Image (cartoon, helix red, strand yellow):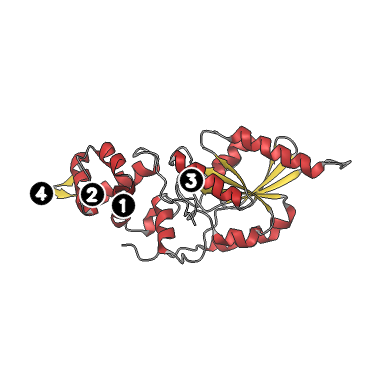
C-alpha cells in the first residue's frame, strides 16, 4: 500500500498566489476536473480561493468514465449551485455547448449596459486534467501547451475567446498534502502526479485491486483472463503472462506489466471506468 504522497513543487505555491491576485478581475471560474475521479481531482484550495464566484465545472475525460456515474456527478455538482458540463476536451466534444453557456453568461452581465464589457474567465484545475486542451478548443488554435504529463503549463496567459470573452489560464495547482491518502493514489492512477516519484509496480497493484473489485468483467475481457484471482498480485502476474512481461528465468517483469496496466487504464483501453461514486446520504 502507498502510504502517503506529498508533492508541492514551488510553482504550485506561485499558482495559488496568482489565483488570489487575479480572481477579482474575472467574472467566473471554469474548474476542470477528471470525470474518472471527480472528488479527488477537485482541489480544496480552489474552493477556498474561489468562494462566491460563479463556477462552471467541466467533467473532462467523460469519454473514459462510466456514463451512469457521469450523470450522477453532474446532478451532484448542480445541487451545489454549480453549472456543469461533461466534455472530452481533447476531441472537442461539448465545446460548442460550453461556448453557448458562456455567451449566455456574457449577455447577462451586459444586460442594460451601454458599453459591452468583455466576459472574463479564469480556468483552474490540478495538473493533467485537460485544461490546456480545453483552452485550445475554446480559442480555436494552439494557445496553450498540452502534454500527457503534469506540469506543462508554466505561467499566466490572458487569451481572447470568440464573442468578446477573455480567459486567464493558470498552471495546475495541487495542495500541500493529501489528508486522505486515497486522494493522492487516485490522482496518481490518472497521471496527475509524476510516475517518477512513485513505485509504479505498487501503484499498478493498487489499481488492479480497485478494478477487480469494481470492474472485474472489464479486467478479464481486456487481458483475456478466465477470472480475476483472489489476490491482486496473482491477477497482476496472470496479466504479465498474457502480455509476455517475462524476464529471463521465467521471472515476472513487474515494472513492465505495471506500465502496461497504468497506460491502458489512462487511455481508456480497459473500459469506461469511474473510480469514485457519488455518496448518497
Question: For the view shown, which residue lies furthest in the front direction?
Answer: 281
Label 4 neighbour load within 10 Å: few <14, some 14-19, many 20+: few
Label 1 neighbour load within 10 Å: few <14, some 14-19, many 20+: many
Q: Nearer the viewer, residue 110 or 116?
A: 110
Disc 2 versus disc 1: distance between alpha carbons? 8 Å
Disc 3 versus disc 2: distance between alpha carbons? 25 Å
Q: Is residue 35 left or right of residue 28?
A: left
Q: Is residue 141 left or right of residue 220?
A: right
Which numbered disc, 3 or 4, marks the residue closer to the eye? 3
Disc 4 versus disc 1: distance between alpha carbons? 23 Å
Which numbered disc, 3 or 2, marks the residue closer to the eye? 3
Residue identifier under label 3: 35
Residue identifier under label 2: 236
Disc 3 versus disc 4: distance between alpha carbons? 42 Å
Q: Is residue 204 above or below residue 222?
A: below
Disc 3 versus disc 1: distance between alpha carbons? 20 Å
Earlier sequence position, callout 3 versus callout 1:
3
Q: Are circles 2 and 1 on residues that touch, CB within 8 Å?
A: yes
Q: Is residue 91 left or right of residue 15?
A: left
Q: Are circles 3 and 2 on residues that touch, CB within 8 Å?
A: no
Instruction: Please state the horizontal and vertical placement of residue 91, each as a whole percent of the image.
Output: 51, 33
Residue identifier under label 1: 204
- Name which residue lies at 28% across and 54% down: 205
Figure quadrant of the N terminus: bottom left
Amino acid at each position: 500500500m502507498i502510504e502517503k504522497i506529498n508533492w508541492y513543487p514551488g510553482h504550485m505555491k506561485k499558482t495559488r498566489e496568482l489565483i488570489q491576485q487575479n480572481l477579482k478581475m474575472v467574472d467566473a471560474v471554469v474548474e476542470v476536473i477528471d470525470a474518472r475521479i471527480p472528488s479527488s481531482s477537485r482541489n480544496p484550495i480552489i474552493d477556498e480561493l474561489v468562494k462566491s464566484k460563479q463556477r462552471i465545472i467541466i467533467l473532462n475525460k467523460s469519454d473514459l468514465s462510466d456514463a451512469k456515474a457521469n450523470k450522477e456527478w453532474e446532478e451532484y455538482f448542480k445541487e451545489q449551485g454549480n453549472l456543469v458540463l461533461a466534455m472530452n476536451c481533447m476531441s472537442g466534444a461539448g465545446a460548442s455547448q460550453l461556448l453557448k453557456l458562456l455567451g449566455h453568461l456574457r449577455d447577462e452581465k451586459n444586460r442594460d449596459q451601454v458599453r459591452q464589457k468583455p466576459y472574463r474567465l479564469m480556468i483552474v484545475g490540478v495538473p493533467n486534467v485537460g485544461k490546456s486542451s480545453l483552452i485550445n478548443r475554446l480559442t480555436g488554435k494552439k494557445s496553450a501547451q498540452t502534454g500527457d504529463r503534469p506540469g506543462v503549463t508554466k505561467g499566466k496567459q490572458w487569451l481572447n475567446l470568440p464573442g468578446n470573452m477573455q480567459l486567464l489560464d493558470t498552471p495546475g495547482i495541487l495542495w500541500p498534502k493529501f489528508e486522505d491518502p486515497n486522494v493522492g493514489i487516485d490522482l496518481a492512477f490518472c497521471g496527475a502526479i509524476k510516475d517518477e516519484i512513485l513505485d509504479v509496480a505498487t501503484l499498478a497493484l493498487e489499481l488492479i485491486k480497485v478494478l477487480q473489485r469494481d470492474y472485474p468483467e472489464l479486467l478479464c475481457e481486456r487481458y483475456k483472463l478466465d477470472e480475476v484471482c483472489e489476490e491482486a498480485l496473482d491477477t497482476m502476474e496472470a496479466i504479465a503472462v498474457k502480455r509476455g512481461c517475462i524476464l529471463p528465468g521465467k521471472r515476472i517483469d513487474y515494472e513492465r506489466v505495471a506500465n502496461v496496466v497504468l497506460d491502458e487504464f489512462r487511455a481508456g483501453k480497459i473500459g469506461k471506468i469511474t473510480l469514485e461514486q457519488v455518496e448518497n446520504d
